[in-house]
Amino acid sequence: MLKLNENPPLIWPNKRIRDFDGTWWVVHCKSRNEKALAWDMVHKEINYFLPMSLNVRKTKGRTVKTLLPLFSSYVFVCGDERQRLEVLRTNRVANIINVQDQAQLVRELKAIEKALTAGIAIEPWQQFDRSCSHRVIAGPLVDTKGQIIHINGKTHLVLTVDALGLAISVEVASNMLEKLN
């Protein structure tokens, strides 16, 4: 288990997703290889996004803090064909998923990046309903769009990554939302 300061950066190099140039791919890693692949890409200077959230648990009287990937076994890579081949050469990849709608993936990743950089608690979410969409109108997630769910009386915004069919949820104040549909 890595100490917090031994984890790879969430985004490499240290810039915003909107500033990346190239084609985006979703890399399906071999089991539990996300962080190792991210370090390989740092050394090869390949752009990537590995969304992770802080997990805090108590064990044997100690508090253990770890960063866990939000999307188990997946890393988002941006680059050219040469860099895609370099990623394959790491021997940590099970498959590379081609993304048909690059603009949509970038929008989805930017929303997740915005939530991570705002320091908002994020949780993986398996189910989502596209029937009613909302937009955040204030706060750190302003202009972020997603679906609304209620968990234990709290409002959460569900952000999806369609290329994976997966989602995450972030808690938001209901007065910071407007209905779009």
Image (cartoon, grey):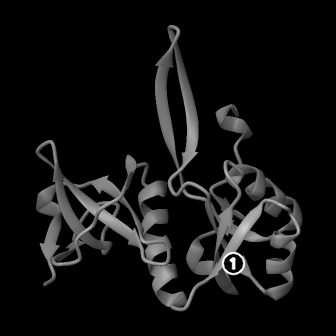
> In front here: 158 or 91?
91
Q: Quadrant of residue 132?
A: bottom left
The image position of residue 169, as x and y in percent, is 33, 56
| Label 1 crowd bin: few (<14), some (14–19), many (20+), radius 10 Å | many
The image position of residue 13, as x and y in percent, is 73, 65
For this view, does 85 lie left or right of residue 78?
Answer: right
> In front here: 100 or 22?
100
Q: Quadrant of residue 81?
A: bottom right
The image position of residue 107, as x and y in percent, is 45, 80
> In front here: 37 or 178?
37
Q: Is residue 19 above or below residue 34?
A: below
Q: Is residue 74 above or below residue 83?
A: above
Q: Could you tell me the amino acid type at mark 1?
A: Cys
Question: At 74% from the left edge and 81% from the top edge, which residue is drawn?
Answer: 79
The image position of residue 109, as x and y in percent, is 49, 72
* Residue linked to disc 1: 78
